[in-house]
């Protein structure tokens, strides 16, 4: 379970997230949908304990698998070496490295240094490390960024299986409407730091029009 309860955060006196509340149940993929600068990443950092909220609180069933928007890693390490190091940090087995490498589509890259990978390949290594230990909760920040169309489809299949097969709670941050429609059970729409709506993609005839209207109303409100 992942839950935000009236999360609020200010930077330099400017309120960038205001009273954000939502919940992700086990076995559910919830999309955190909003334009760039809406407050998605700030909210996720508060959920993960990486940023202290100025108001409200958060609860995440841990441990949590986290994929940041920009995955770095250690460039001199091989993919295998990095995943083995993270397996030790997360106190899982070395056998888990082979499992997550296959699931994330990087089994053929295990000998390659991270510094020699493309952006899309690095993103898939980032997913692999998030999968280590089969955590009960995942926070994925723009997980398909930098992937080619085939890799996007594969990544979405993995995300769906985390909820439907493993029973995990998955929070997926994205600004891509097609992603929200194809992967998510629900979407939480955020704009200008506030939750504007919760939707079920299948119950909304035109999610794009609805999203654009909500974002436009947020601009007028503020």
Image (tube, rainbow, N blue to C red):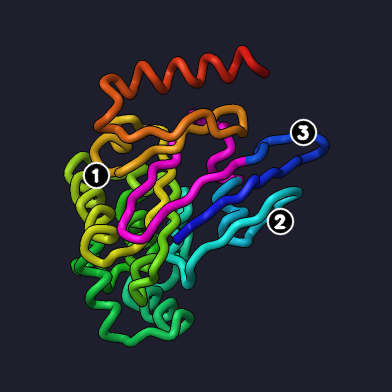
Q: Quadrant of the N terminus?
A: bottom left
Q: Nearer the viewer, residue 48 or 129?
A: 48
Q: Secondary structure at mark 2?
A: loop
Visible in this render: residue 198?
yes
Q: Secondary structure at mark 3?
A: strand
Above or below for 201 versus 81: above
Classify residue 87 by image quadrant: bottom left
Mark 3 or mark 2, which is nearer the start of the sequence? Answer: 3
Give me the residue at 38% from left, 84% from top.
Answer: 92
Q: Is residue 9 magenta?
A: no
Spot occupied by residue 194 in the image (x, y as percentages of width and height): 60, 33
Spot occupied by residue 143 in the image (x, y as percentages of width and height): 37, 49
Q: Secondary structure at mark 1?
A: helix
* Residue tagged 2: 52
Above or below for 154 versus 112: above
Spot occupied by residue 202 in the image (x, y as percentages of width and height): 24, 32
Left or right? Give the position of 71 relative to 181: right
Task: Point out which mark residue 14 bears.
Answer: 3
Spot occupied by residue 8 in the image (x, y as percentages of width and height): 69, 43
Of circles 1 and 3, which is in front? 3
Region in magenta: 20-42
Q: Nearer the viewer, residue 109 or 46?
A: 46
* Residue tagged 1: 152
Give me the residue at 28% from left, 80% from top.
Answer: 96
Left or right? Give the position of 141 relative to 28: right
Give me the residue at 33% from left, 53% from top.
Answer: 28
Classify residue 39 by image quadrant: top right
């Amino acid at each position: 379970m992942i839950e935000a309860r009236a999360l609020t955060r200010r930077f330099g006196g400017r309120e960038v997230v205001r009273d954000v509340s939502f919940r992700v149940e086990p076995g559910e993929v919830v999309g955190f949908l909003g334009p760039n600068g809406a407050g998605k990443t700030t909210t996720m950092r508060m959920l993960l304990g990486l940023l202290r909220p100025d108001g409200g609180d958060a609860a995440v069933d841990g441990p949590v698998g986290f994929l940041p928007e920009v995955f770095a890693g250690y460039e001199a390490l091989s993919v295998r070496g990095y995943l083995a190091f993270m397996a030790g940090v997360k106190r899982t087995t070395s056998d888990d490295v082979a499992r997550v490498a296959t699931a994330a589509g990087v089994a053929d890259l295990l000998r390659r240094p991270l510094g020699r990978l493309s952006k899309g390949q690095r993103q898939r290594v980032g997913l692999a490390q998030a999968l280590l230990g089969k955590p009960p909760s995942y926070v994925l920040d723009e997980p398909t960024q930098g992937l080619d169309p085939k890799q996007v489809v594969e990544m979405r299949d993995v995300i769906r299986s985390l909820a439907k097969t493993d029973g995990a709670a998955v929070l997926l941050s994205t600004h891509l409407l097609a992603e929200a429609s194809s992967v998510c059970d629900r979407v939480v729409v955020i704009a200008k730091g506030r939750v504007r709506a919760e939707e079920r993609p299948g119950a909304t005839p035109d999610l794009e029009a609805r999203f654009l209207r909500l974002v436009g109303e947020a601009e007028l409100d503020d």
